[in-house]
Structure formats: structure tokens, C-alpha cells
Amino acid sequence: MAGPASEAVDLIPETAIVSLDAYRAAGGGAGLAEAHRLGPAAIIDVIARSGLRGRGGGGFPTGRKWSGIAAQTGLRRYLVVNGAEGEPGTFKDRALLRANPYQVVEGMIIAAAAVGAEAVFVGVKGSFQREIEALTRAIQEMQEAGLCHDCTVTVVGGPDEYLFGEEKAMLEVIEGKPPLPRWFPPYEHGLFASSPQEGWEAGPHGSGRRTDEPNPTLVNNIETLANVPHILARGPEWFRSRGTEASPGTVIATVVGDVVAPDVGEVEMGTPLRAVIDAVGSGMAPGRTVKAVFSGVANPVVTAADLDVSVSYEGFESVGSGMGSAGFIVYDDTACMVDAAYRFSRFLSIESCGQCPPCKIGSGEITKLLDKVRSGEGTDHDLAAMGGWLARVTDGNRCFLAVEEQRVVSSVLRAFPEEFAAHVEHQGCPLPGDRPMPKLVDLAGGQASYDENYWRKRPDWTYED
């Protein structure tokens, strides 16, 4: 459901495209043909002029990222496609792979050619069987048709852990190891590169590949690459005709939580958040109003006062938050924000890998304190202790998870101090009622199903019987 725009291209078509013939009939392949005509440098120039920004959450300019990898001459390079999608409230990449995997494959072929990657690896959770099958089918058909005749693509089914989606941890998984983030970013320390300090060894996928070079590696999200063939086929000006100056194009938004019909849909960048909640999630139940919106678990809360914020990178920044991957978790006026903070903190504390003790210990202690407050046993001293842990949970962090803990919990404390005070003063929650942790298993037809196993998961990544 793209917003108003001329010549809109639906990244998620109404009818799923399940064959290469159907994709070609809809114009597929035109971007790749234009890429062959242009050559690597000109491809990167087109992407840079389009203003496309990474859709994985950070919003980094895609053209600048590609040019940085391509500029490192004389080295082995790789492309990694991130389809792990483990953040609560997000379903966009799975929706894209179900609806039209061919545009994603075409985008990765173009990206690999632009940066001179010798091989492509796609990281997808092993539990995403439907998406893996669709992606594998699209790759095989395009290889058989000669559209991907000179490219090697490996689909890697990874673990369920949240950190599998962290780009440095994804490289570890591709090399056959656990999802534990490295120190250095992929453009400095890429796939199958010898570690400058620890001598890491490659796992099953790395046999015979290990080199003494840094092997700069481009990591792009599924949605980012889905946009690429359309930009090449129609031009950067077409892409910039939608969205805002700083955030051109459309974005795939997921809306879940206290809405009438949770769903995923394509909206034009710059659309007010209030309108996105109505258009994608079918709005609120009669008599209910929005109290808070979280863009995944990585950014500060957006309160009811800011519902007209533009869904764009600069829009969310203007209200002290971040758009992330446009996965919006909506809470209505009956929701307890202490409970929401506890659930997000618990998720992050469990998913913390433990390589950085302040992160693992700190997020765990914050979670325990939040649980104490929400159950009516908390004191003002506990709130002060929570503030102390929030101040140092990020010490020495090698990935963004500890920052997420700090930003999300601190923002709820600032935005809803009266709720924390009420829990302490009344020794109980004035707004009882459980809500699911929105870690999505499936999303279709206005119905969301969540991972109930989340509540059984322990901090060491094992599960209770």
C-alpha cells in the first residue's frame, strides 16, 4: 500500500511472484540489463544519486557504502545479504521474500558486480523455511536463465539468536561459528580474513578461503537490495520523486501490538506515523488511543504527543528517536509502560552474548529491577540503582545491543515517570494485563503470531524444559 506517488512500484505486490517468467513479465531484469550497460563505477554513481539509505535500521547511504568497498583495490571482496530479521515488531524482509524474491536476487547480483564481490552469502534464520525455499528457487531459476551465470550465491541458515542479525556476528555465523560480534566492522575485517589479534579460524564455510588480507565485505539488508533493480531500471530521479530529500523512496513498515489488524505494507517516506498506524495496522480499537510506539527494541519510545512525526530518518531523529527498520510496536492507553520496559529489557538481556560483561550483567540487573518494580516490590532505591546500571551498561560494548538497552529503558523512565512512581507508591501495577512479546513467527491476514518460546529462553541461550 504505497503512499501517493506517480509510477509507484510495489516491492510487495498484491499477488506473489512465484516464477521467473512472471517476474520478467512484470519488468524484472531491466535493472540488471542497465547495470551491464553502465559498469561498476556508474552503477555506484546511480545508487549514490538516488539517495537510497540502508533499510536494516542504521540508514547509512548505500552508494557511499558501496563506493567504500569498491575503492579498496587489489583485495578479495564479498557481499553478505542480511535477512536474519530477529528484531521484535519486524516482518518486512520475510514479506519481501514471500512476495517477490526475484527482485532481491537481482539486487544482490547488481551489488556484487558493482563492488567486485567474488561470492555472495545470504544470512537467513534457519527457521524461515518458507523464505529460504522462495529465495533458493529464485536463485536457481536466475542462474539457469543465465542472469546469474558468473556469481556464486550461498544461502546460510543461521540460529534464532537476535545477534545473528548484527553484521559482524553474521560474518562469524557464515564462517561456521556462533553469532558473537567481532570488534571490527566488515569493511575492515571481512569474511575469511585472518584476525589481527586472535587468529580466528574459519569453520565449515571457510575451508580453503582464509587469507591474510582484510577481505572487505559489503553487508546490505534484504529490503535495501530489493530497491536496487528498480532504481537502475527507472533512474535515481524516479526514486527521489517519492519520500523526502533526506529519506527518498518508500519503506516497508510493520505495525503490530494494540492495533485492529497487525500487518506489513509499503508507505512513502515522510508519511506521518499516525497515518502509517491507520493504513498498515487498521488503526486502534474503538475508544482506544495510542499511548506509545516503539520502533523495534533499538530506539527511544515515541509518545502520543509525537504521532505526527514523519516516518523518515530525519523525522524520528527530530523527536529524539530512530526509525530503525520501520517495525512499529503500538501500545494503547491501557498499557503499562513499566511492563513494556521490562519485556524489552528482558529480551535484550537474554540476547546479549556475554562478550562484554557490562552489557550482559548490566542488562540482567536492569531487568531484575524492572521486574521488581512492576510486581509491586520496588523502591526508590531500586529506581536509583537502575539509573546507575543504565549509565554504565554500554562500557566497552562491541555491538549496539547495550546501547539499545540504555536508550529504550531510559526513554521509558523519562517519558512515563508517573507510572514508575505509581508502582512504587501503590505496591502494584495500576494497569494490569499481559501483552505478548512481539517477536513475530508469522504475520498474515491481519493476524500476528508470536514466539511463545521466548519466555522459556535463558540468558545462556538454552531453553527451559
Image (cartoon, grey):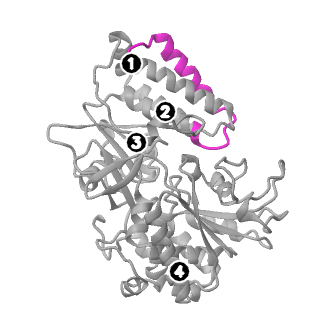
Question: Residue 345: which disc?
Answer: 2
Image location (x, y in percent) of residue 46: 54, 76
Tell me the element at label 4: helix
Circle 4 sits on which residue? 140
Q: Which residue is mark 3?
A: 452
Q: Nearer the viewer, residue 251 or 311?
A: 251
Find the distance from the CA under tag 3 to the CA under tag 2. Answer: 17 Å
Q: CA distance from mark 4 to mark 3?
A: 34 Å
Observer-side mark, 3 or 2, equals 3
Q: Amino acid at mark 1?
A: Ser
For disc 3, the neighbor class at 10 Å (few under 14, some 14 to 19, many from 20) is some
The amino acid beneath tag 4 is: Gln
Q: Which residues are magenta?
A: 376-402
The local crowd at label 2, few if under 14, some if 14 to 19, many if 20 or more residues have their Cα within 10 Å, is many
Residue located beneath label 1 in the image:
375
Q: Label 2 amino acid?
A: Ser
Q: CA distance from mark 3 to mark 1?
A: 21 Å
**Residue 58 locus on image (x, y percent):** 53, 52
Q: Is residue 150 above or below residue 297?
A: below
- Tell me: residue 287, above or below residue 12: above
Q: Earlier in the sequence, mark 4 or mark 1?
A: 4
User: Could you tell which of marks 3 and 2 lies nearer the N-terminus?
Assistant: 2
The verdict on residue 400 being magenta is yes
| Crowd class of label 4 (few under 14; some 14 to 19; many from 20; radius 10 Å) | some
**Whole-Å distance between the Cαs marked 4 and 1?**
53 Å
| Callout 4 touching callout 1 (CB < 8 Å) | no
